[in-house]
Image: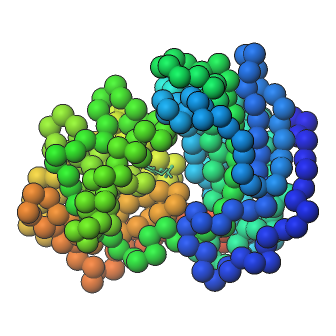
Amino acid sequence: MDIKVSRTEKSRLNVVDYDHLGFGKIFSDHMFSLEYSGGRWHDPSITPYGEMCVQPSLSALHYGQAVFEGIKAFYSKDGSVNVFRADKHHDRFNRSCERLCIPKISWEDFWDALYALVRLDHEWVPKKRGCSLYIRPFVFASDPFLGVKVSDTYRFMLITSPVGAYYSGGPVRLLTAPEYVRAFRGGLGCAKTPANYAASLMPAEVARKKGFSQILWLDGLEGKYLEEVGTMNIFAVIDGKLITPSLEGTILDGVTRDSAIKIARDLGVVVEERRLSIDELVSASKEGLLEEVFGTGTAAVITPVEEISHKGVTIKIDGKKERRLSQMLYDEITGIQYGLKQDRFGWIRKV
Ligand code: PMP
């Protein structure tokens, strides 16, 4: 891909406080764009990050035809930049596009764009452990048109953001919301598309006002089985076994979920991908068999859950125990990401 590059005249890097990054608030110097019209992708460019011009009738703003991804790049101990599982993210990106009737992007174009942008802004990759460069690929329908139909034109973009921890407050408290549903079978649940996040905002606000970090979503049909959490997949350790909801089309096929499963199996842990009911969690907790609960996500990495509240019943997950498995998975995943452990699954691509 022949990318037209116009560099910023003045980098903003020197005003960034790398000790207080937060998440998703600061954006690197440049952004990538690629246009789609006439049945093909064209005009790749890198320009200074900043405002862009769109029409008020932009189709994506009205009808939500859009898809995004979240990928991380890490400063490796050998001084290079490690991008984690970009191919798996690209795969999910295209699956989401398919569900939203958006034309796919080839792996070559996706990687060329990501590589060029991260390389140009490589100095923005934080050097501190626990921090990384968050890469946000996204695509949106760009027809200036009112009316519900598949757009003829699109824009694919990449922006990047140096980030710290997503949940900076440590273990999280979750609330179920039996009166709300995130996704139904046959719906959009497994696509990374803005509509899913829009649907989650109001229940998440209710949870936050009650002092919880996030909603633990239950299945839309019976309100019985665990699905996922805000921006994380959910795992429980019951009697030594690692259990996570199976992929049945309503939850996101998390890249960190897949990494955790592969690492756990590799270390000899029994992993079950199956339906897991909230009643099973309550019983396991009463019998003293519920050892750990944690969420997995690119932003959240491995985040321990210390409490789940469901219809007035509180499940406490003992924070004083060592959280052996979640800690081990955290160490393994971040070890590979920062180049401190051998990349034995071939998950790292260097920039
Ligand atoms: N579920 C949802 C709804 C998410 O937004 C995310 C974050 N992308 C995840 C799960 C975790 O997915 P991943 O590990 O690929 O980041």
Q: Is residue 278 left or right of residue 38?
A: left
Q: Position of residue 279 (x, y in %)?
A: 11, 52
- Looking at the picture, does residue 54 appear above or below residue 197? above
Residue nearer the viewer, 208 or 336: 208
Q: Position of residue 23 (x, y in %)?
A: 55, 67
170 versus 137 height, above or below: below
Q: What colour scheme does the image use?
A: rainbow
Left or right, 168 with reference to 132: left
Query: In this rendering, does residue 136 appear at all?
Result: yes
Q: Is residue 339 above or below residue 259?
A: below
Q: Quadrant of residue 25?
A: bottom right
User: Which residue is at a point 74% across and 21% down the rendered structure image?
Assistant: 37
Query: In this view of the protein, which residue sits in the foreground, 200 or 335?
Result: 200
Query: What residue is drawn where x is 51% and y is 26%?
Result: 100
Q: Residue at x 40, y 67 (%)?
A: 303
Q: Quadrant of the C terminus?
A: bottom right
Question: In the picture provided, is 213 more to the left or to the right than 59?
Answer: left
- Based on the displayed image, in which of its 4 quarters is residue 294 positioned? bottom left
Task: Give the quarter of the image for residue 155.
Answer: top right
Where is residue 340? Give x, y as percent.
66, 71
Q: Quadrant of the N terminus?
A: top right
* Image x and y of residue 140, in percent: 61, 34
Q: Nearer the viewer, residue 277 or 186?
A: 186
Does the image show residue 341? no
Residue at (72, 46) in percent of width and height: 52
